[in-house]
């Protein structure tokens, strides 16, 4: 996420974000484009979220512990991807499931932990079918991507604002936009379509107080 030139252009009221139980602005970690996410996370306004991916990082556990401590200090919502045991160890506020993992089922212990702790569940969705699976699993939100052309998936087909609006009508859970989301492109999203914005970089921090 861009840390320079903070702006309030991404405030909830200005973009017409719908509501969900989690943060409206989420930093998504990536070991290639954001090897050390701590500095970017420290620049987020309180009330934002951090989605820890770093799937191939051999130091993932240690990095996750440092990130969890920072999130507590900064009042950020930590969501851990794919590993419910790590999420439980860190006392994370949520678990994120990649679409493939959600498609092939989730281990009963993971669902049991989610229900006992009443933590957030987000699921990646790249199709209407994936949105249906997210609803079946009781997801609190679906991360839909890529909304716009993204450096993470160059040349990949994008959802786009129009199709996103159609998917919103089908979805039974709030949607979070991911992929090519910047201060400029976020303004192209139809008002009320998404409940949050997520990005690895290029997203200007929102204003420090929620609307």
Image: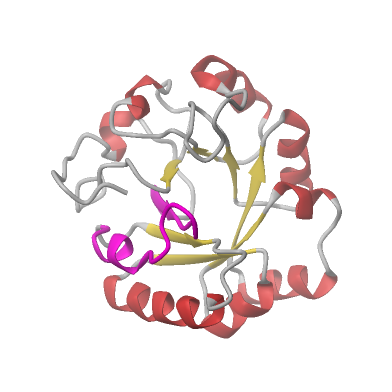
Q: In this view, does 192 lie above or below 81?
A: above
The x and y percentages for residue 181 are: 40, 34
Residue at 20 percent of width and 47 percent of height: 207
Residue at 67 percent of width and 64 percent of height: 82
On the rendered structure, is 21 left or right of 13? right
* Residue span colored magenta: 23-44
Residue nearest the observer in this picture, 172 or 97: 97
Q: Residue 27 colored magenta?
A: yes
Residue nearest the observer in this picture, 17 or 28: 28
Q: In this view, does 149 lie above or below 140?
A: above
Most extreme residue toward the left is 5
On the rendered structure, is 18 left or right of 14? right
Image quadrant for the C terminus? top left
* Callout count: 0
Q: How is the image coloured?
A: secondary structure
The x and y percentages for residue 55 are: 61, 64
Residue at 76 percent of width and 68 percent of height: 111
The x and y percentages for residue 134 are: 72, 45
Q: Is residue 176 above or below residue 192?
A: below
Q: Residue 43 colored magenta?
A: yes
The x and y percentages for residue 208 are: 19, 53
Residue nearest the observer in this picture, 195 or 67: 67
Residue at 52 percent of width and 40 percent of height: 152
């Amino acid at each position: 996420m861009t840390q320079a030139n903070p702006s309030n252009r991404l405030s909830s009221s200005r973009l017409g974000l719908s509501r969900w139980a989690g943060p409206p602005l989420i930093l998504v970690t990536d070991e290639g484009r954001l090897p050390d996410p701590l500095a970017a996370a420290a620049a987020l306004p309180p009330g934002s979220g951090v989605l820890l991916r770093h799937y191939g990082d051999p130091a993932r556990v240690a990095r996750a512990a440092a990130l969890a401590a920072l999130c507590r200090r900064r009042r950020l919502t930590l969501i851990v991807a794919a590993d419910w045991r790590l999420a439980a160890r860190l006392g994370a506020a949520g678990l994120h499931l990649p679409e493939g993992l959600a498609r092939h089922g989730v281990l009963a212990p993971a669902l049991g932990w989610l229900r006992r702790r009443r933590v957030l569940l987000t699921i990646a969705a790249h199709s209407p079918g994936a949105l249906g699976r997210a609803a079946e699993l009781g997801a609190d939100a679906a991360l839909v991507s890529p909304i716009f052309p993204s450096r993470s998936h160059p040349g990949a087909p994008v959802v786009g604002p129009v199709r996103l609006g159609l998917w919103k009508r089908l979805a039974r859970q709030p949607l979070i936009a991911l992929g090519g989301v910047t201060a400029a492109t976020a303004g192209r999203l139809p008002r009320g379509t998404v409940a949050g914005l997520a990005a690895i970089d290029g997203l200007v921090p929102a204003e420090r107080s929620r609307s």
